[in-house]
Image (cartoon, rainbow, N blue to C red):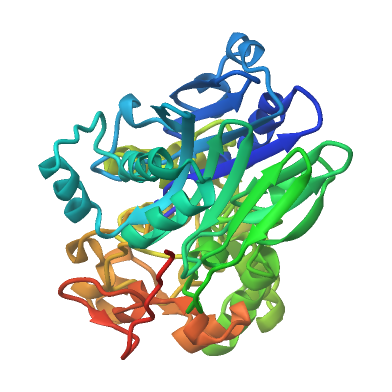
Amino acid sequence: MTGPKHSCGVIGLYSTKDDAAADIFKALRIIQHRGQEGAGISVFNGTKVVTAKGPGLVHDAIKKEDLGKLNGMCGIGHARYPSAQTKGEKNAEPIEVEMTHGTVAMAHNGNITNYQELKKKYLDAGWSFLTDSDSELISRVTAKYLVQNNDPIKAIRSMMSEIEGAYCLTVLYNNKVFGVRDPYGFRPLCLGRIHDKGYILASESAAIDIFRGEFVRDVMPGEIIEITADGFKSHPSPTPCQTAHCMFEWIYFARPDSIINGREVYEVRRNVGEILAKECPADVDLIMPVPDSGRAHALGYALGSKIRYEEGFMKNRFVDRTFILSDQKQREAGVTLKLNPIRSTVKGKRVLIVDDSVVRGTTMPRIIRMLRDAGAKEVHVRIGCPPIIAPCYYGVDMKSRDQFIALKYSLEETREQIGADSLGYISISGLVKAIGKPENDLCLACLNSRYPTPIPGETHRFQSTLNHSFE
């Protein structure tokens, strides 16, 4: 609830039946947590690409009557969370671009770091843009290369050679579906097989599970997956890739039942809690989570500390997730609508609450105040993510250093600001150990200010930049 905001989830699907849209709709609802401002589906109906999209949750954005018009065996879908610059219905995805050879539709998760530079280049060349979204730029550049040679793999590779940053794409071009992952693998994308119904691409493996499908594997960094009626074909990256998987996928964004880059999210979060208990012990009566995102972390802390685990909050599940609301005042007000302490659990107790992360530190004081008002004797806080000290340029909506509480105050000052009796964060080395991947395979830039790709004014963590040439 106090964590960062994320942008988007994508789906791509090729079915053996004429019901791709219904299955994409179902899959989008599984990854709804990745974006709540808008949603859309594009399918190829045998003649042309047809799209339905709109604002709000998936079931609001895509009406029942819309689904009835989306008849086709292949398609893509998108659940949207906007950055501050790309709010509004006009930026809903998938984005379509019509050409002589057909229509390309695209759904995007991530953030292009050279967007302004590329947009100026094409504006100077006489292009016009209908949105302020980097997704439109990616779509238009891909379409440009499709017009030149009508070879989707070559067109996508040429597009990849121009854009920089984080991107996972699902692309619909006539009767083919493509999954594309950037050469660093910032954002997750996986491939699954739906028994007797074809193949699916999804931001999270939980979208495969809903069909009782088979998880095939993660899409590799720099790889293009092509899905047709005959199955799928891999087009690996032509050059070596230095991975930089976003650590927040395991800590906060993804569903606990998803597998991200070979590691189950729930297991990682439980590991985080156990390590946190060893690094930041506390003399308390019980451990409780800030639901839902802090639940596995808190369970791990209880296991590691051998202190009783309790549910201390009742959660109102009919209120939107506060982390994903676009307005800070909405997020803060949403805390009291969403959570209410269970008095019998906390009254007279020394409680320790575990949450996944703290960015601004504006909602945690409200949570602590609730517990004190409910009779908690002491309230201690443990955080399953190291202090956030640097902006993210790769799709997490943390753009400015002045919003980070860890940069404004020392640990003790932060404790005073939020009103806790004690405060502790997991270390970076502890987090890396919990994830179970080499540190150089992860993007930890928001924790250590060392960026995987060149960012003007920021420290580049690699002495020599890999040249990702896709032509």
Residue at the spot 49% in from the left edge and 70% down from the top edge = 247
For the question of whether residue 315 can be seen, the reply is no
Q: As drawn, which residue projects farthest toward the left?
A: 124
Instruction: Give percent across and percent down for residue 115.
Output: 25, 52
Residue 267 pos. (x, y %): 70, 70
Total numbered circles:
0
Residue at the image position 52 percent from the left and 20 percent from the top = 60
Residue 218 figure quarter: bottom right
Q: Nearer the viewer, residue 229 or 260?
A: 229
Q: Nearest the camera: 115 or 281?
A: 115
Q: Quadrant of residue 461?
A: bottom left
- In the figure, is residue 457 to the left or right of 439? left
Q: Residue 249 in the image: state x and y as whole percent.
A: 53, 62
Residue with the most extreme front position? 149
Q: Is residue 364 above or below residue 282?
A: above
Front-most of 16 and 434?
A: 16
Q: Place residue 294 in its image quadrant.
A: bottom right
Visible in this render: residue 294?
Answer: yes
Q: Is residue 304 left or right of residue 433?
A: right
| Vertical order, 458 against 226 (above or below) | below
Residue occupying the far right of the picture: 196
Task: Name the spot of residue 194 as percent of width and height, x first.
Answer: 81, 43
**Quarter in which the C terminus is drawn:** bottom left
Of all residues shown, which one is farthest toward the top? 65
Judge by depth and name the residue closer to the eye, 348 or 110: 110
Above or below, comparing residue 328 to residue 17 in the picture: below
The answer to whether 11 appears left or right of 61 in the picture is right
In the image, what residue occupies the spot 61% across and 36% down? Answer: 28
Q: In this rendering, would 348 be left or right of 17? A: left
